[in-house]
Amino acid sequence: MRIGIGYDIHPLVPGRPLILGGVEIPFEQGLDGHSDADVLTHAVIDAVLGAAGEGDIGHHFGVSDPRYEGVRSLDLLAESWRRLEAKGFRVGNVDATLVAEAPRLGPHLRGMTAELAQVLNMEAARINIKPTTAKGLGPLGSGEGIACLAVVLLIEAGDREA
Ligand code: MG
């Protein structure tokens, strides 16, 4: 078994869709970034890559690379996971904490979980996403951005055909 951690933060700006875990969430602001700025999926990618000892998201999908401009982050997770699955990894479980002062994320957790489970080829019941707030403290507390911390346990089953 191998454990990995991922952390990400993006600023909220007007005029962008808010995408978390591949789900578009109705809100007056969205996360800014080179890709769709899906902070949950970015943290999960880093946790998955970290567990596998494969560096980080920036190493595989450079921010200066025009191929990844506006890309759906869930597609980057799918690309990362295909490689790792071919190396014999499967996911034990995913646990993530999303820090967002607004909007309320509770109604969207099931959708995010389903999207991540499909891409990671795993049961949704092994993915846990916990929304919380920063209790008004600091830039996250004033709603300037959304942050995410994710932990992933990978199970190494040895080589197998891709
Ligand atoms: Mg990011």
Image (cartoon, rainbow, N blue to C red):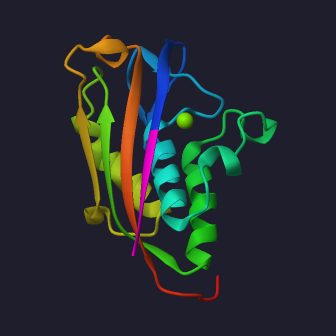
Front one among 85 and 158: 158
Front one among 53 and 67: 53
Q: Position of residue 161 (x, y in %)?
A: 64, 88
Location of the C terminus (image quadrant): bottom right
Question: In which quarter of the view is residue 90 placed?
Answer: bottom left
Residue 134 lies left or right of residue 25; in this view the side is left
Q: As drawn, which residue projects farthest toward the right?
A: 66
Q: Residue at x 24, y 43 (%)?
A: 130
Q: Position of residue 113 (x, y in %)?
A: 34, 52
**Quadrant where ligand 1 appears:** top right
Q: Residue at x 45, y 69 (%)?
A: 121
Question: In which quarter of the view is residue 116 placed?
Answer: bottom left
Residue 128 lies left or right of residue 11; in this view the side is left
Q: Is residue 63 above or below residue 151?
A: above
Location of the N terminus (image quadrant): bottom left
Q: Main secondary structure of the magenta part?
A: strand
Q: Is residue 85 above or below residue 110?
A: below
Q: Residue at x 45, y 47 (%)?
A: 6
Q: Position of residue 18 (x, y in %)?
A: 46, 27
What segment carries the magenta color?
1-7
Determine if the magenta segment contains residue 5.
Answer: yes
Q: Position of residue 49 (x, y in %)?
A: 55, 59
Q: Is residue 130 above or below residue 35?
A: below
Give the total of numbered labels: 0
Residue 76 lies left or right of residue 110; in this view the side is right
Q: Residue at x 52, y 52 (%)?
A: 45
Q: Is residue 142 above or below residue 72?
A: above
Determine if the magenta segment contains residue 102.
Answer: no
Q: As drawn, which residue projects farthest toward the left?
A: 135
